[in-house]
Image (cartoon, grey):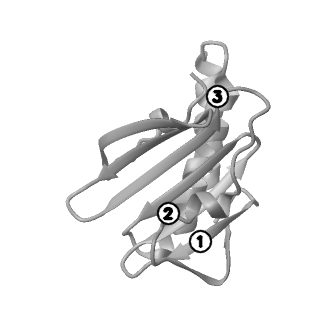
Amino acid sequence: MGWTVPYLERTDMQADHAETGVVEGVRTIRIHMANSDHWINVSETRAEQGGLELKPLEEAMANSEGAEAEGDGELPLSSGQTGSLLLGEDYWTSGAERAGVQYVISSDLPKAHAAEITSWVLATDRSRLQVMPHEPGAADRLERGFDEMGSWFSD
């Protein structure tokens, strides 16, 4: 409860595997999704207890060996936030954060999809938070659905 990664779904990708680990009280859950042509990895990192700080997003993204920032490395998102973008030879890595959580996303999809996919992860985070901690009712599910559909047309 409280994690976004288990709620990530894409009609064009199948969840292949997930893994988790804890380092110094900070947990990361990573999910790998793929289809016959492309893949997406999403890592979600949160402190397990209050008072612990997450390392800077740039450090979390540094595991992308060989990837370099394009231009200033900023990635404008449909939510109005700005993420970070690194480009590798045949993949990209983006990063975004909200209070207490960081997301690092890597994929071999064309770079043009980086903002869309990063925005999708943050929209899933926001819509999940709108229904916690109570059980969602019909009105909650409709509101989440309309919010999600609204983000599709705001690009």
- What is the count of numbered marks? 3
| Residue 136 at x, y percent in the picture | 60, 17
**Sooner in the amino-acid sequence: mark 2 or mark 3:** 3
Which residue is at a point 65% across and 22% down the rendered structure image? 139
Name which quarter of the figure residue 94 lies in: bottom right
- Above or below 48: residue 123: below
Mark 1 or mark 2, whichever is nearer to me:
2
Helix, strand or loop under label 3: loop
Write down the residue under mark 3.
48
- Give the side of residue 83 with respect to residue 103, left or right: right
What residue would you read off at disc 2? Answer: 63
Measured from the top left, where is residue 61 in percent x and y? Answer: 57, 62
Mark-to-mark CA distance, 1 and 2: 13 Å
Q: Residues within 10 Å of mark 3 (few under 14, many from 20)?
A: some
Tell me which residue sits at (35%, 48%) in the image: 32
Q: Is residue 125 above or below residue 74?
A: above
Q: Amino acid at mark 3?
A: Glu
Inspect the image, locate mark 2, and give the three-letter code of the amino acid beneath it: Asn
Looking at the rendering, which quadrant does residue 148 occupy? top right
> Which residue carries the number 1 mark?
85
Residue at the far front: name it: 24
Residue at disc 2, secondary structure: loop
Left or right: 10, with 146 as reference point: left
- Residue 1 percent coordinates (x, y): 56, 21
Q: What residue is shown at x 56% (from left), y 66% (from top)?
A: 62
Say which quadrant the C terminus sits in: bottom right
Residue displayed at 71% across by 57% down? 56
Label 2 crowd bin: few (<14), some (14–19), many (20+), radius 10 Å: few
Sequence order check: which comes first, mark 1 or mark 3?
A: 3
